[in-house]
Amino acid sequence: MRRWFGSLGAGLKTTFIGGTRLFVLAPLIPLIAIIPEFTQHVVEIKLGMFASKDAFNALAMDPTRWAFGYAKVAGLMLAIFASARYWGGARERWWDLRTVAWKPFVIALAGNTALTIALFGIGSRLSVAAKLVFDVIVTIATFPMLVWLIGPLLGDRAMTLRRTYTGGWGRLLLMVLLAAIAFWPASQLHQWNHRWAMGAPHAAVWALMVWDAVVVGLIACWTGAALGAGYRGGEAEIDTAPSAEPLPIR
């Protein structure tokens, strides 16, 4: 247990210090999230969304806004993945998709997809109460499969379904906890930025939206670093490149 808490402390260090350092070490990673986020803010400002809360609500589903919103979501996910690869991948070459363990990933993706379809079919035949119990049990039982899916994306060619269940629970808990700690507080600040912008002077709105785009970049870098550090048992060193050797599952 003491060793696990030590891994948590190391993971927090990598999450927040290492994640923030990506703005210098690999600035393209936060920019993947920042640019589409700020571009959508430009559209929102030009639409007049921040004139008032009523204006924001009325324009929230505007097709033009959502056209840029899809790009924003894609950019955020790609930046999280890139940050995770930087701090948890088999190599520092986070941008090189040749370092992804494609064969294990395809197998894990197929396994997760097939299980999801099968469980959906079973759940659809149950009563509401039975389905609730079923969903809770299945979620707990299948949660380690997330490790099976993420490992190959980070370059771990040794990850298998069997290793996920025999030794991946501690790693899974660390990944989820670190990611939650990284994502939730920053996402609240992201929400507050929008509230502060409602009805604010034009210059203040622009300043807040520039700042908000940076916050989204931090969210991506911190969340990805949390997943990467969690997968590596919290042992990613923030002063050096990630090790080329996969760490043993705890």
Image (cartoon, helix red, strand yellow):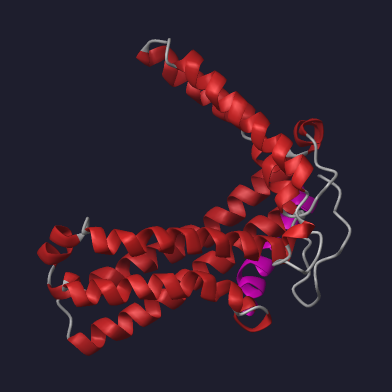
Q: Main secondary structure of the magenta part?
A: helix
In the picture as drawn, the residue positioned furthest to the right comes out as 245
Could you tell me if residue 223 is visible in this image?
Answer: no
x and y percentages locating residue 178 in the rendered image: 61, 56
- Location of residue 72 with respect to 199 vertically, above or below: above
The magenta segment is 1-21
- Location of residue 157 with respect to 141 vertically, above or below: below
Give the residue at x 72% y 65%: 87
Could you tell me if residue 64 is visible in this image?
Answer: yes
183 relative position to 86: left or right: left
124 relative position to 11: left or right: left
x and y percentages locating residue 121 in the rendered image: 49, 16
174 relative position to 130: left or right: right
x and y percentages locating residue 120 in the rendered image: 49, 21
Q: Is residue 87 magenta?
A: no
The image quadrant that residue 92 belongs to is bottom right
- Location of residue 92 with respect to 233 vertically, above or below: below
Give the residue at x 27% y 73%: 43
Number of marks: 0
Q: Quadrant of the C terminus?
A: top right
